[in-house]
Amino acid sequence: MYEAIDTSTYVYLSTEYISGPSLLKYLKSKPDRIMEEEEVRLIWKQVVQAIAYLHSKNISHRDIKLENILLTKDLKTVKLIDFGFSTVCSPYKKLKIYCGTPSYMSPQIVQRREYHGLPADIWACGILLFTMFCGRFPFKGSSDRELYRKIQRGLYNTPDHVPCQVKGLLTKILNIDPIKRITADEILEHDWVKK
């Protein structure tokens, strides 16, 4: 273990070797880039548990995406990586630095408004969940500008094969109002996640 200091909080970095693929590489290996429901639940729940832990320490990751999730060789354990954009955030103070990967950015970030970091992470978790079930992003555009307009409206179509409980959960996660967006702890109490 190595110890580093980040805005007066101790952050522990591990040099652990992960033998499996990234979630992106694994998803690309699947037919139509679509994962089975049980597999999605197993992997995504672990991502949300990691985010819930970070949020309990007032840390926002700010770059949750398929590439930053590694799987062990048996494909059963998740490791969240790349904390380069992460920050300690006060529940009362909004962030001003706009960062992340465009397809995963919350409406507040693409509007270049000050934002709370924790709800932005939840939004990115919703993008992950949608992508794991559908093999594509919920919001697409021919340019970043068009993509950002679609994200700001928060309108997307969920295919019929996605379970009803997941559709309901996505509605709570991909809510354009960050105050109404569900939290990581609330996600972990959702019936579909606990199943």
Image (cartoon, helix red, strand yellow):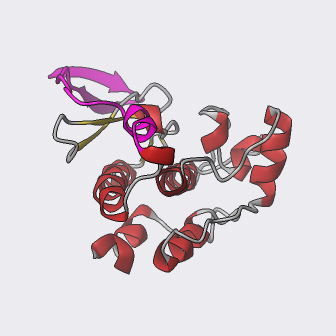
Q: Quadrant of residue 177?
A: bottom right
Would residue 150 appear left or right of 14 to someone viewing this image? right
Q: Is residue 43 above or below residue 63?
A: below
Would residue 71 appear left or right of 33 to someone viewing this image? left
Q: Quadrant of the C terminus?
A: bottom left
Magenta span of residues = 1-30
Q: Find the residue positioned furthest to the front.
A: 31
Would residue 119 appear left or right of 103 to someone viewing this image? left
- Tell me what residue is drawn at x 73 percent, y 44 percent: 140
Give the camera-side residue of 13 and 106: 106
Residue 92, position as x, y percentages in the image: 57, 55
Residue 136, position as x, y percentages in the image: 59, 47
Res. 50 visible in picture: yes
Q: Quadrant of residue 143?
A: top right
Residue 174, position as x, y percentages in the image: 62, 62
Res. 111 visible in picture: no
Q: Is residue 18 magenta?
A: yes
Q: Is residue 41 above or below residue 30?
A: below
- Tell me what residue is drawn at x 22 percent, y 22 percent: 3
Q: Is residue 13 above or below residue 58?
A: above
Would residue 172 appear left or right of 144 to someone viewing this image? left
Residue 11, position as x, y percentages in the image: 29, 31
Q: Is residue 65 magenta?
A: no
Total residue callouts: 0
Q: Quadrant of the N terminus?
A: top left
Give the camera-side residue of 176 and 26: 26
- Tell me what residue is drawn at x 30 percent, y 30 percent: 21
